[in-house]
Image (spheres, rainbow, N blue to C red):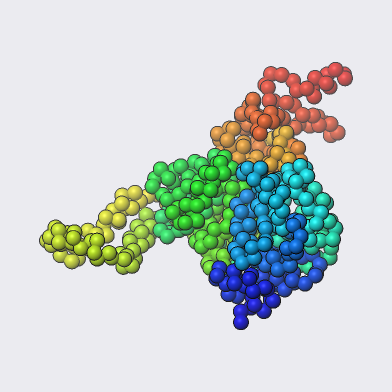
Amino acid sequence: MSLFEEFGLRKEILSAIAEMGFEQPTPIQEETIPYLLIPNADMIGLAQTGTGKTAGFGLPILQQIDFGQKTIQALVLCPTRELCMQITKDMQNFSKYVPEFKIVAVYGGASIQSQIQALRAGVHMVVATPGRAMDLLNRKLLKVQHVRWLVLDEADEMLSMGFKDDLDAILSDTPKEKQTLLFSATMPNEIREIAGKYMHDPVMISVGKKNAGAENVQHEYYVVHAKDRYQALKRVVDLHPLIYGIVFCRTRAETQEVADKLMGEGYNADVLHGDLSQAQRDFVMSRFRQKHLQLLVATDVAARGLDVNDLTHVINYNLPDELDVYIHRSGRTGRAGKTGTSISIIHTREPGKVPQLEKLLSKKFIRKQVPGGMEICEKQLFNLIDKVETVEVNESQIDPFLKGIYSKLSWLERDELIKRFVSVEFNRFLSFYENAPDLNANVHDHKSPDSRDGKSRRDRMRFSRLFINLGTKNDMNPSNLIGLINERTGNKSIQIGKIEMMKKFSFVEVDSRFEREVMGSFRDCTVDGIRVSIELKTSEGPREERLVNFTRPGRKSNRGDQREKRR
C-alpha cells in the first residue's frame, strides 16, 4: 500500500494520481496533506517551486469539497496566468474520476466572457490572478462569501509584483471562518504582515531552510566586463551542448536583443516577455515544454509561475536588483529530486553581491573561469562522438545509400576517415574560437574592482535624485524602472543608485553626469496612458526641498509658478 493510500484519500483520487505516476508523497505533501484533511488552523508553507505544493493543498481540498453545493468553496490566488493555468490543469487531472468537481481559471489576457459564463454555471474552485479576481469581485460576479479554503500560492511573488492592495481587498472580502493557506519560497516582512492581519494562529510547515534555494542546485558565476557579457553567455551555452534552460534578463528590450542575437547565430532559442500576446506566449511555451527549444530568454515577470520540468540550467544574464528574486530564478532548476545549475554572468561592479547571495541561501557560490576556445571545441567534439555512439540506425531506410557511400569513401583508411568525420564539427567551432580572447575580468572574489582608499566607486560617484510619477500602482518595480530608463536613454552604462518605490511615484538615483540625458529622454513619454513626469529633487537649505521640473526644458514647473505667485 502506497503512502498516498495511507492518507485516506477517496479511491477515485488515488486512481487518478496513480495514473499520473504519483507513488510517494514529496516532503511538502507529506506534511500538508494529513494536516489539511482534518479541521485545523491556518497554515504557512515555506517551499520552493517544483516541490509538489499543488497536490499538497489540492488533494485534501478535493477530498473535502461538498459537491451538493454549487458554490465557490475554494479560491486559489497565484501571481501569473501560466501558474493559474497549470494549477487548474493539475486539479483537473487529480479529479479525472470525480466528474462532479467543477473548476475554472480566471486570469487576464483571455476572454472574460467565457470565465463569467463558467462562474454563472457554478463552480467549486476558482484559480485566479489577483487583478482578474478583483475585476470580477467589483462586477459582483466572483462570489466568495462561501469560501472555506483560501490559498495564496507563491505569495512572495504576488507581493513583489505589486498585488498587495488587491490581496488586501480580496482577503477582507472572504469569510472570517475559513482556512487560509499561504505558500511562499521566501519569508519577507510583507508575508509576516499578511499572516498577522488575516491568519489565525497559523502553523508553519517548512521544507528546507527559510529563504533557501533548491537543495539540488549548484551555484556558479563568471566575472566579465559588461561589454563581454553576451560573448560570455555564448561560451557558457557552447560549453553545455545539452543545455535546456532559461536565460534571465532585466528588461524587455535586453531580453529581445539577446534572443534576437542568439537566434540570428543559429542557437535554438526564443523570447518571452510582457509585450507578447497570449497566443504568442502560448506558442513559445508549447515549443519550450516540448523541448523544441533549448533556451528561453525571459524577464522575471514573464517567467513567474512557469511550470517546466527537467531544466538543466538557469542563466542570470544579469543579477536581479532584489536578491530574493534570485531564489525564484534558481528554483526553476533542480526540481523533483533532479540536479541543476544556476549560472550568473557578473560584471566587474557586481562581485560584492555574491557574499550577500551566499548568506541569503546559506550556500557557497563557485567562481568559474569563462571557457576558452579549445575547451569548448573539446566539449562539442565529444558531444558529437556521444551522439554517434547512441544514434539509432534505421537499416531499411539507409541501406539503399550505403553502397554508394562505401564506394566514395573506400580510399580512406580507418584513422583518416575518423579524422575527417570529426573535423566536420571541430572545424566549425575552431574557426570561430581560434585566437578567441580571454573574457575573464581580473577581479578578486567578493571585492569591488573600484575600491580605492577604502571607498567604493559608488561612494565617490555623485548621484542625482529624480522623482518620477510612476509607482507600484502602475506595475512598476525596481527592475522595470531600470529597464524603462535603459530603453528611453538607449544607454545601459548609466549607473543607477538607490531606488525607492511608492504607490504612485518613485525616487531613483542616477549618475549626475547623465542627469539631463535621463530627464530629456522622458520628454513626451507615456506609460500605459500616463504622461510621465520626471523631476530633479534638490535642496535649498536645511529645511526646504523643491522639485524642479525638467520634462520641458526651458520652462518652470507648475510648482515653481505657484511659489512665484505666493511670493
The residue depicted at 18 percent of the width and 60 percent of the height is 400
Q: Is residue 232 visible?
A: no
Residue 369 x, y percent position in the rendering:
47, 58
Would you place residue 444 above or below residue 452 in this image?
below
The answer to which of 196 and 394 lies nearer the viewer is 394
Residue 360 position by quadrant: bottom right
Q: Is residue 273 left or right of residue 207?
A: left
Question: How many labels sit on residues?
Answer: 0
Residue 440 x, y percent position in the rendering:
47, 53
The answer to which of 521 and 447 lies nearer the viewer is 521
Q: Is residue 407 left or right of residue 434?
A: left
The answer to which of 362 and 238 lies nearer the viewer is 238
Q: Is residue 115 left or right of residue 242?
A: right
Furthest residue toward right: 566
The residue depicted at 44 percent of the width and 43 percent of the height is 261
Residue 230 x, y percent position in the rendering:
47, 46
Would you place residue 429 above or below residue 8 in this image?
above
The residue depicted at 55 percent of the width and 68 percent of the height is 20
Q: Is residue 566 visible?
A: yes
Quarter of the N terminus within the rendering: bottom right
Residue 534 x, y percent position in the rendering:
70, 30
The residue depicted at 76 percent of the width and 67 percent of the height is 204
Quarter of the C terminus within the rendering: top right
